[in-house]
Image (tube, rainbow, N blue to C red):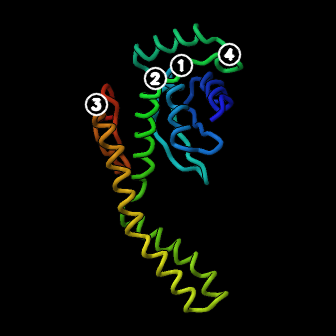
Amino acid sequence: MGKRHIRKMLRRMGTGEPVHASTGLGTTKGLARLAFYAEQFGYEYAGAHQLGKKYVIRVVPAHDPEARARAAENWVRYPGAASRGALPQLDEDAVAVFNARIGFELATRFTEKQMLGLTTFGFTGLALGPWIKFGLVVGGTFWLALMALVPILLVANRRYRAKNAALLKAAGFTPVTDRDGQPRYLPPAADPRD
């Protein structure tokens, strides 16, 4: 991820309003880096979602005194961060925690039933082309092969969520369910009622 996305986000943060940010590829690691830099300059990570084909994070102004002090210090130390100046050193451990948090949230957007339905619908759509072009035998075989992947994908998603949940628990994060019923992890100092 280039610094261009970081600088664009920092300029938008200058308004003091919540900001949605994404990288060119929208990878969770790139989004985690954006969240890290937002935290260095007075914002905090508030969630991740999919917008079209890209993943996007939402960052909001942080109100706790420690975050404000860190932001003030970093704006003084890195006055050109939003343009072409230097940026703070990237903390890979902090980025790994953000990456786990973003990955967990994106992996739990849908329940397993919803994932099963979406995958079945999508794989059926993919099998229509071969069925129309080559007939029922080829199309049906292709569909069966795709459907055989469904349990593998569900197990892989469970493992991915469990791996990220374990990392977040080890970092002191608290599991909660948000207003929409989605499981999330809040940082150690966050109020679960937010």
Q: Quadrant of the C terminus?
A: top left
Q: How far apart are marks 4 and 3 (CA)?
A: 34 Å
Helix, strand or loop for disc 4? loop
* Nearest to N terminus: mark 3 or mark 2: 2
Q: Distance between the residues labelled 2 and 1?
A: 20 Å
Q: Distance between the residues labelled 3 and 2?
A: 19 Å
Residue at image location 60% in from the left, 39% down from the top: 22
Q: Distance between the residues labelled 2 and 4?
A: 23 Å
Relative to the observer, which residue lies in front, 175 or 100? 100
Q: What residue type is labelled 2?
A: Ala
- Dots 2, 4 in contact, CB < 8 A: no
Q: What residue type is labelled 3?
A: Gly
Q: Mark 1 points at which residue?
A: 89
Q: Which label belongs to residue 85?
A: 4
Relative to the observer, which residue lies in front, 141 or 88? 141
Residue at image location 64% in from the left, 11% down from the top: 79
- Dots 2, 1 in contact, CB < 8 A: no
Helix, strand or loop for disc 2? loop
Q: Which label belongs to residue 62?
A: 2
* Nearest to N terminus: mark 2 or mark 1: 2
Q: Quadrant of the N terminus?
A: top right
Q: What residue type is labelled 4?
A: Gly
Q: Distance between the residues labelled 1 and 3?
A: 23 Å
> From the viewer's perspective, is residue 145 above or below residue 162?
below
Q: Mark 3 points at which residue?
A: 172
The answer to which image quadrant residue 96 occupies is top left
Q: Residues within 10 Å of mark 3 (few under 14, many from 20)?
A: some
The x and y percentages for residue 179 are: 36, 46
> From the viewer's perspective, is residue 51 above or below residue 20?
below
